[in-house]
Amino acid sequence: MTTTKALALALLTLPTLPCAAFAQATPSAFETVWSGWLTTQEHPAWVVEDYSCFVGCPKVAYEHLTALLDDPANDERPLNVLVGETRAFITEYLRTRSTPAGLALMDGNSEANDTNLECHPYDFVRSATNPLPFQIVRNGDTLTISYEEWNRTRIVYLDGRAFPEPLEASSLGYSIGRFEGDALVIETRGVIASTYAPITINAAGGYSDQLSGVERYTVTPGDTPVLTLELTLEDPGTLTAPYVYYKRWIATPDIELLTDSCADKPGVF
């Protein structure tokens, strides 16, 4: 779909955020700094779907937009219309997989009650899919995942342990990882309930303290490696079926994470 895809360049107009400084790359496939579309917009790895889902979206929505872009019937339709239809698809998709409690969270949410505006650091889901750079470092039997957004840090245990009982809840939860072939798989439980968890730019739900998440990361090698995440969420409190996020980043070993603070947040005083 040549005409519509050509229009994409005109829409990718958000300013590239400053993340300069240099750091040495690490040898492991996963151990480096990873950056998404928001801070590396001019990189050729990105496609329109990454622009639309720069804060993550359900995998079926990514595929939905791909199908719209590949359909010759949409060649002359404006790109922003196709992206808008995809975001409407996401909202409806979440509604069809939500319990009454989940629907109530969706209906009560808006940008005005985003907890980010109250200087509340991101929780598990928003951290795992946030649009700013993050770094993965292995230290023996643990991985440290450091996010530029809010400067939050997660520890992932790789020593084969089971989840502790009782499990003390936290906003980022308790994470246990393993390697399955070329994939890094991280299971997280023990999260504090969240009343605001954006599913995409215009759809926000929430989740209960029953939420569990399985992150599956894979790396596509090349001149610029690409990290792909499939995050499967299950929550009997708000979801009737698993919900799978999809998001991509590129390796940016020359980027150093910046110091983030509440004062840097638009609309936060």
Image (tube, rainbow, N blue to C red):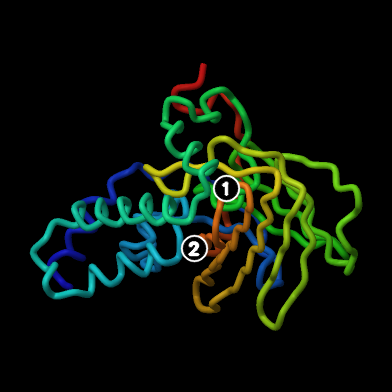
Question: Where residue 104 sits in the image (x, y, percent)?
Answer: 49, 37
Tell which tag, 1 or 2, sits nearer the viewer: 1
Give the amino acid type for the residue marked by disc 2 in the picture.
Tyr
Q: Residue furthest front?
A: 100
Whether 34 is drawn above or below 111: the answer is below
The secondary element bearing badge 1 is classed as: loop
| Residue plotted at (72% across, 79% down) | 180
Question: Where residue 248 sits in the image (x, y, percent)?
Answer: 49, 63
Which residue position is annotated with label 2?
246
Give the amino acid type for the residue marked by disc 1 in the picture.
Thr
Q: Residues within 10 Å of mark 2 (few under 14, many from 20)?
A: many
Would residue 154 be found to the left or right of residue 71 on screen? right
Question: Where residue 24 sits in the image (x, y, percent)?
Answer: 67, 60
Which residue position is annotated with label 1?
238
Whether 97 is drawn above or below 124: the answer is below
Viewer-nearest residue: 148 or 56: 56
The secondary element bearing badge 2 is classed as: strand
Question: Where residue 64 sits in the image (x, y, percent)?
Answer: 32, 67
- Quarter of the image for residue 85 reads bottom left
Would residue 75 be found to the left or right of residue 20 on screen? left
| Residue plotted at (64% across, 41% down) | 123
Whether 258 is drawn above or below 249: the answer is above
